[in-house]
Each structure stands twice: as C-alpha cells, then as structure tokens.
Image (cartoon, rainbow, N blue to C red):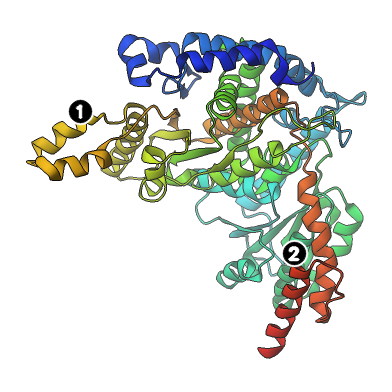
C-alpha cells in the first residue's frame, strides 16, 4: 500500500467529516437511546465506553475499512508470529511472548523463545520467594525491607507505575523505591531513608552501559560499600541485563543476573525481568495474574473482529480525532490516585513509539502522527487544565479511567471522585447552550445588562470527545489488561500511519551530543565546537561554577 492518505478509505473519511460536521453529540444521544449499548465493549471487568465521541455507525464502519486497507490484521499477525517488524533495527517485537501462558510456540529466527522466557520467570519466582520469605539475607544477615530499582525510561516508568498502582496488593514491611534521573537529588532523596543492611538494589540496563543508570548505580554502590564493605555488593545488588561481563565487573554475581532480549523494547518490557520489583512486591502468583490480564487482552486483540475490537477502536478513534477533527493533544485522566503514574507511562509508550515523521519506507509520514499526551489524576486535573477542555479553542480528547472499587477505606471520598469523573465526561459532551445559561442566570436573580455581559462566559460548546474506561477493580489482572490495551492501540496507530513504532532514533541524538559536552563541563573548558548559544551556555555554566567555589 502507498500513502494511506491517498486511499479511497481515507478520502471517504474526509468527506464523512464534512457531512457530520454540524451534528452535536447531545443530539446523537437524544436520537438514539441505545447509543451506549452500540458504542461500548465489556471485557470481563474492563468496560470501554466510546459513545461520547463525534461518531455515527457510518464513522465506525469507515474507520474499520481504513484499518483493513492499512492491513492492521496482517501486521498484527506478523508481530505475534515473530517476524522482524522493527525494520530499522532488524528485530522481532515479542513483548506478547512474555505473557504467553499457553504452550503456543513462538519463534525468532527458527528458535523457540518460550523456554528462555519461562526460565527467567522461574528465576524471578525464586528471588521473589526468597526476598518475601526472609530467606535472602544481606551481608550482615538481615532480611530485606527495601527494594531500590535503578533504571531509566522503560526500565523505570513501567515498574514504578505498576508498583504504585498495585501497592495495596504488596507485602507488608516491604517497600519499593525508584531512581531514574541523573540529577543526584533523585538518589539523595531515597538513600538517606534506607538502611544499607536491609536494602536490595536492582540495576536495570540491557547493555549495563546506560549513562544515567550506571552513574546512579555506581553512587548507590559507593553508599553501600561505605557502610558494609566491598564484599557486600553481591548480597545487595542484582541486575537485569544481557551483559554478563559488565555485570560481573560491577561486582554482581551473574547467577543474580536476569536476562532480557533484543526483541523486547524498553517501553514494552514491564512483562519481563524489568518487572522484577513488581514481582517481589506483590508476589509471583499475583505477577502471573498481571501477565494473564495482558494475555487476555492479546487474545481479544487477535481474535475479535475489528468492529468490536477494543484496542483497534481506541486507536481508530484517536486517528479520527487527530487526523480528521484536528486534535493535536490527548489527555489521559485516571480518577485513581493509584494510577497517578499511568499518564507518564503512556507518554513514553505512545510518544516514543509513534513520535515519528518518517515512515517505514524512509519517506515522510503521510499524516500527522502521535498527539502530545498528558494527564493528571482526577480531581487535580479539574483544577489545573480542564478549563481549556471545556471552553478553550483547541480540541483535546480525553480518556477517563475510573475504578469501581477503591482500596482506600473512605467510601464517601470515592463516590465523590467517581461522580466528578462521570460529570466531566458528560459536561464535555453536553456543554451548556445559551438558552440554558440564560435560564440559570435568571434563576439566580441576574438579569438585564449584567446577565447579558455574563452570558457568553457561561456558554460551553460541548461536543468534546472522550472515552471512559471503567475497571471493576484495580488488581494485577485488570492492570495487565489496561496496559496491553494501550500497547495495542499504539501499534495499530503506527500501522495506519505507516511508521515503525518500535525504534527510537530520536532519543539517541541527545545522548550523542551530551557525550560530547560532558568532558567540557568536567574540564571546565569549552572547545568552541558548538553553535554560539551552546558555546555560551557551557562557558557561562563553567564561570558560574567557578564563581560559586
């Protein structure tokens, strides 16, 4: 297929947009009492309501036609079968194999990867049981009370998000901490609260050379050995890596190195040994429930017709809002404090995957790709940026994520939280007409010139799209389903935009240039080999540093 924008399916959607441009969602709801039933999917404890979008049945049909002409199903099958769909790095993409709980054969270059996957899962179980059961002892014979994960990007965002989300399922007396930023304040905010005798560090770096991670790991090692001596490293550090030589050189026993493979991308790696902090916190049985939830979403994605396929429809609605209705941003709003880190996790998942302007074929991408994604837990977002959703002049679609049963023992708080979530989605859809605003002002006793002046400020256009994902509870299985839903959404959008969702060359340029600049900061002398702004900033930084000594 050539450019997706040249297809008759894309052109049909453009024409359809013009046809329904004058329709308002509140009228669509008024005309169709079964709209929710027709535009929602119930997935065993996860309800996906997409009825509050500017769509009709024809829109849905045209969007699924677009998915078929882009060969979403074919690309899906190639990914699951182990083909090298990451063409720029010549790699398979098999995060789905990590949660394959069946006996289905999964091959890469003729090798079945499942024995290796199961071996690492068994290794994770052994460590989880050992730490949780007090069998693992530190250098002084104390049991472990604190886990510190040192990683960055996918080696941090996934486990940090999941450990916070499932903290209510964690073991009493065991805490997880996460250090990712090369800003020393990140590490220094964690270490003073810990006892080196009862702390276990997980260093997560595929190559064991990632600058930020290894700087933090070296500092953590210095903190530990300063208190317990050099021999303590083997009792207080484990690694998630492929580089045995570097792991051994660091002082970690390679028996405590958990393998990860090149067919697992960082932002898709929570299902691998990168999820070790979560497996220790909640226990391996619960971690396997987490995998099972993702596997259930995989099965739904692979087996369900596009018209009722939740990840496909979530992706297509994003395409519709972005490429046809002009939205350049997407909000994810978890009405759950436990999911506070979920928007940040999705920022990497979606924006690093699909933040591309070049297609798989090396030609310019045919359409606008990923929108800017942001979010904040409700109700905080309502008092920050949601004014712009309601009355701003930019279209910002929103995904509301609501949990039915709260882990907190404050039921009235939870009902108020959920009421706000449902009210926000209703307000975005309905808006408030001029007649309604005038009636409100009259009821408040405001009339005449004052009412006339206030009236424009009281009108809300509505017709703002949103999805609502209602989870029966936030447990390992439903969290696994939720993450996999967004993974597949991201993949489907990449297929339609014709881009490779699994490389991240844009991340590398900044790292390369930082490697050139760092020696100039260490030495205090710029080599003047940059643009005038960067040269001046290096010089001024070095001068400020010297003046402050």
Residue pictured at 69% horizontal, 56% vertical: 136
- For discs 1 and 2, the disc positioned in front in the rendered view: 1
Identify which residue is drawn at 29% across, 44% down.
413
- Tell me the element at label 1: helix
Q: Is residue 142 visible?
A: yes
Label 2 residue SS: helix
Q: Is residue 469 above or below residue 219?
A: above
Q: At x 80% / y 45%, what residue is drawn?
A: 505
Dividing the picture into quadrants, the one containing residue 310 is: top right
User: Could you give the CA–CA distance between mark 1 and mark 2, rounded to whole angstroms?
Assistant: 63 Å
Q: Is residue 445 left or right of residue 306?
A: left
Looking at the figure, which quarter contains the N terminus?
top right
Query: Is residue 252 among what the camera can see?
Result: no
- In the displayed structure, would residue 115 be above or below residue 181? above
Residue 217 - label: 2
Q: Which mark is residue 435?
A: 1
Location of residue 317 (image quadrant): top right
Q: Residue 101's x, y, as percent?
A: 70, 25
**Residue 40 rendering spot, x and y as whole percentages:** 45, 17
Residue at horizontal 79 percent and vertical 76 percent from the top = 521
């Amino acid at each position: 297929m050539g450019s997706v924008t040249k297809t008759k399916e894309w052109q049909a959607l453009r024409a359809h947009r013009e046809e329904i441009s004058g329709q308002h969602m509140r009228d669509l709801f008024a005309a169709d009492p079964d709209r929710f039933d027709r535009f929602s999917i119930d997935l065993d404890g996860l309800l996906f309501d997409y009825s509050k979008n500017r769509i009709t049945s024809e829109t849905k049909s045209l969007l699924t036609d677009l998915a078929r002409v882009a060969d979403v199903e074919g690309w899906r099958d190639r990914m699951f079968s182990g083909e090298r769909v990451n063409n720029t790095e010549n790699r398979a993409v098999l995060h789905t194999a990590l949660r394959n709980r069946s006996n289905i054969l999964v091959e890469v270059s003729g090798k079945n990867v499942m024995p290796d996957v199961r071996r690492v899962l068994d290794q994770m179980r052994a460590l989880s049981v050992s730490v949780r059961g007090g069998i693992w002892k530190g250098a002084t014979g104390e049991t472990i009370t604190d886990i510190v994960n040192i990683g960055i990007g996918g080696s941090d965002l996934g486990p940090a998000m999941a450990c916070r989300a499932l903290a209510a399922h964690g073991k009493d007396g065991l805490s997880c901490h996460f250090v990712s930023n090369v800003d020393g304040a990140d590490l220094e905010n964690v270490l003073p609260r810990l006892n080196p005798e009862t702390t276990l560090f997980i260093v997560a770096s595929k190559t064991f050379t990632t600058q930020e991670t290894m700087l933090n790991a070296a500092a953590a090692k210095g903190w530990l050995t300063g208190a317990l001596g050099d021999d303590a490293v083997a009792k207080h550090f484990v690694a998630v890596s492929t580089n045995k030589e570097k792991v051994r050189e660091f002082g970690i026993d390679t028996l405590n190195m958990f393998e990860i493979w090149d067919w697992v991308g960082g932002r898709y790696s929570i299902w691998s040994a990168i999820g070790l902090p979560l497996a220790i916190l909640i226990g391996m049985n619960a971690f396997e429930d987490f995998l099972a939830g993702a596997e259930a979403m995989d099965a739904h994605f692979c087996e369900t017709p596009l018209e009722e396929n939740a990840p496909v429809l979530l992706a297509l609605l994003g395409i519709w809002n972005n490429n046809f209705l002009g939205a350049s941003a997407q909000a994810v709003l978890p009405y759950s404090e436990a999911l506070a880190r979920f928007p940040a996790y999705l920022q990497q998942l979606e924006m690093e995957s699909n933040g591309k302007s070049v297609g798989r074929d090396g030609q310019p991408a045919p359409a606008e790709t990923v929108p800017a994604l942001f979010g904040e837990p409700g109700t905080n977002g309502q008092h920050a940026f949601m004014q712009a959703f309601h009355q701003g002049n930019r279209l910002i679609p929103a995904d509301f994520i609501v949990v039915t049963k709260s882990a907190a023992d404050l039921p009235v708080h939870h009902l108020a939280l959920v009421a706000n979530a449902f009210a926000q989605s209703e307000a975005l859809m309905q808006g408030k007409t001029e007649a309604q605003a005038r009636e409100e002002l009259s009821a408040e006793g405001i009339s005449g010139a004052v009412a006339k002046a206030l009236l424009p400020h009281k009108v809300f256009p509505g017709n703002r799209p949103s999805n609502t994902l209602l989870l029966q509870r936030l447990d390992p299985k439903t969290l696994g389903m939720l993450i996999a839903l967004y993974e597949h959404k991201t993949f489907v959008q990449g297929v339609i935009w014709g881009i490779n969702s699994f490389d991240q060359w844009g991340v590398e340029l900044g790292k390369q240039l930082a490697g050139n600049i760092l020696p100039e900061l260490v030495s205090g002398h710029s080599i003047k080999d940059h643009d005038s702004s960067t040269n001046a900033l290096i010089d001024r930084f070095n001068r400020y540093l010297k003046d402050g000594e």
